Amino acid sequence: MKSKEKKIRSRDVHDVLELIGGTWRGAILATLCEGPLRFSELKLELKTITPRVLIKELRYLEMNKMVYNSKSTVAGNSVVYSLTEHGLSIEPIIAEIHKWAIIHRKEVLGV
């Protein structure tokens, strides 16, 4: 592989990992792959995330067109978060990360 192609490839990988990286973004995206959730449901699924951090990360993902929110007509005035079409495109990557984690959990986490 040429050096320029290698640099472009590593930059692309870096950009994606920046988008889904951190403690919570990947977990938020993985949770929303299962379907839309209200803020309180998302918070419940992610257990230890604080509301402040969840709001910050959701805003980041919205800014990057991965997630959108809409008012729920069913649950009163609550906000429902969903993956955008662009966000849904990351589902196969999340699934592969999940598979890798299951296979390598013992080596990586020691459990």
Image: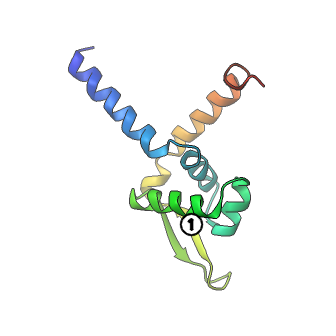
Which amino acid, mark 1?
Answer: Tyr
Residue 88, above or below 69: above
Residue 71, above or below 15: below
For label 1, count other residues whose C-alpha is less than 10 Å away and answer few (under 14), some (14-19) or many (20+). Answer: many
Q: Nearer the viewer, residue 53 or 60?
A: 53
What residue is drawn where x is 34% and y is 27%?
10
In the rendered image, residue 65, in percent from the top left (x then y), is placed at 40, 59
Residue 2, above or below 90: above
Count of all numbered marks drawn on residues in the image: 1
The image quadrant where one finds the C terminus is top right
Q: Farthest residue in the top direction?
A: 1
Q: Quadrant of residue 36?
A: bottom right
Q: Nearer the viewer, residue 50 or 37?
A: 50
The image quadrant where one finds the N terminus is top left
In the rendered image, residue 43, in percent from the top left (x then y), is placed at 68, 61
Q: Quadrant of residue 17?
A: top left
Residue pointed to by mark 1: 81
Q: Farthest residue in the right direction?
A: 111
In the rendered image, residue 105, in percent from the top left (x then y), is placed at 70, 26
